[in-house]
Amino acid sequence: MNTLQAPRSAGRARTSRTELITVEHVSTAFPSADGSTLQVLDDVSLTLHEGEIVALLGKSGSGKSTLLRTLAGLISPTSGEVRYRGERLTGANPGTAMVFQSFALMPWLTVQQNVELGLRAAGVGPVERRERALAAIDSIGLDGFESAYPRELSGGMRQRVGFARALVLRPDVLLMDEPFSALDVLTSENLRGEVASLWARPDVPTSCICIVTHNIEEAVVLADRVLVLGSNPGHLKAEVEVTLPRPRDRRSPTFEALVD
Ligand code: ADP
Ligand code: MG
């Protein structure tokens, strides 16, 4: 028996306690139109570890996107701090990449050009850029669509481009802001299954996923931990460890035996 052909997730260690992103007592307020301020996050503390999938679950307006953008270092909190591998963030978080609900693709660029964009910005040379982009495109099932334009693709395929564009950056932490909510049920179920198995692949360096959702089922199916955000202002209301059996093989006895 070729054990290397056994579960694709076999190389992924289970959750370690290595801290990737730490949020400590973060509060965030935005100026509102009438000159007052709008308190959006209130004293939020959380930690994302290597090897886990964490869902941020909350109603619309509870501050989920604000919190996710804070993890990415795109928003500086009014008070409190965010650390990546122990280093306090002062700008964009170098260990993260984002996937957006609305895909956010450049319509005038091909699939491959969209995927290469972030690498270009990071100063990666053309040969490596192409190689990494093609591998990322292939890994998410878009092989053969390198030269297509976003308008020629279905919603599910556009979001695949969104995933390829994030994964090509090889982030430690993949941040996803309601990545499936613009897709129909079947497409989103398919894609989320693929994302879970991609994450489990030993050749994919991303070891932590943080997914924002308002869909309880999605949170429970995908995540190891669900953080529930309450509204007005956004605050951590509950934390739920998910222990239900899931269609993911990384917890199966076979897998546990293989990683030993
Ligand atoms: P969610 O993603 O949970 O729907 P958001 O984080 O997008 O919530 O928004 C939370 C609240 O903060 C909303 O009331 C929204 O209008 C407000 N908000 C978000 N971003 C800004 C901003 N840049 N400036 C002012 N208000 C904002
Ligand atoms: Mg949002």
Image: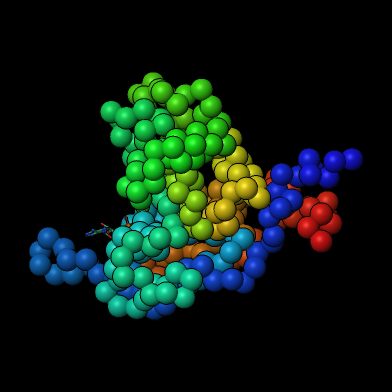
Residue 54 sits in quarter: bottom right
| Residue in front for this viewpoint, 126 or 11 | 126
Which residue is painted at 68% across and 55% down in the image?
12
Q: Is residue 194 above or below residue 84?
A: above
The image quadrant where one finds the N terminus is top right
Q: Quick one: 226 or 138, which is closer to the camera?
A: 138
Quarter location, residue 150: top left
Residue 179: horizontal and vertical position, in percent?
45, 44
Left or right of 55 in this view: 245:
right
Residue 101 visible in the displayed image: no
In front: 218, or 46?
A: 46
| Residue 187 percent coordinates (x, y) | 53, 32
| Quadrant of image for the C terminus | bottom right
51 vs 3: above or below: below
User: Which residue is located at x 32 percent, y 30 percent?
Assistant: 109
Q: Is residue 134 visible to the viewer in this orientation of the structure?
A: yes
Residue for point 42% across, 52% down: 97
